[in-house]
Image (tube, rainbow, N blue to C red):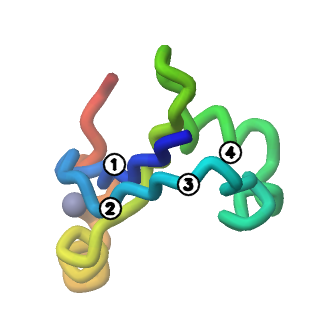
Amino acid sequence: MTIQYVCRHCGSVIGVLDGGAVSESRLGLHFLTLAERRDIIAYNADGGMTVKVVCEFCREALEANPELSLVGSPLQ
Ligand SMILES: [Zn+2]
């Protein structure tokens, strides 16, 4: 199973995990509510997952300019 971490703001790929034995609990995803999981995790047709997170660049930008979070997320 391939797990791709993508920034939800700029869309850049942060990292890719490729491990057959990676479980959701190992990724910490079991702490999320169902609604959060639906928002953050996308299951791909090939059986992999895409996890939407915030990259370091965007995190710093958001911390410096909190109002960006209101306009920074692209509609999908
Ligand atoms: Zn980003």
> Measuring 52% from the left and 37% from the top, which residue is drawn there?
49
Residue 3 placement, left or right of 29: left
Q: Earlier in the sequence, mark 1 or mark 3?
A: 1
Residue 38, image x, y percentages = 65, 33
Q: Earlier in the sequence, mark 4 or mark 1?
A: 1
Residue 23, image x, y percentages = 74, 54
Going by the numbered disc 4, the residue's amino acid type is: Glu
> Measuring 27% from the left and 65% from the top, which residue is drawn there?
67
Q: Nearer the viewer, mark 1 or mark 3?
A: 3
Going by the numbered disc 3, the residue's amino acid type is: Gly
Dot 3: what SS? loop
Q: Quadrant of the N terminus?
A: top right
The CA span between labels 1 and 3 is: 23 Å
Q: Which mark is residue 72?
A: none
Question: What residue is pinned by disc 2?
Answer: 15
> Is the C-beta of the residue carrying label 1 under 8 Å from the nearest atom of ligand 1?
yes
Mark 2 touching mark 4, by CB under 8 A? no
The CA span between labels 3 and 2 is: 13 Å
Q: Is residue 48 above or below residue 22?
A: above
Quadrant assignment, res 39: top right
Dot 2: what SS? strand
Q: Earlier in the sequence, mark 3 or mark 4?
A: 3
> Measuring 29% from the left and 44% from the top, which residue is drawn there?
73
Q: Nearer the viewer, mark 3 or mark 4?
A: 3
Question: What residue is pinned by disc 4?
Answer: 36
Question: What residue is pinned by disc 3?
Answer: 19
Question: What residue is pinned by disc 1?
Answer: 8
Q: Nearer the viewer, mark 1 or mark 2?
A: 2
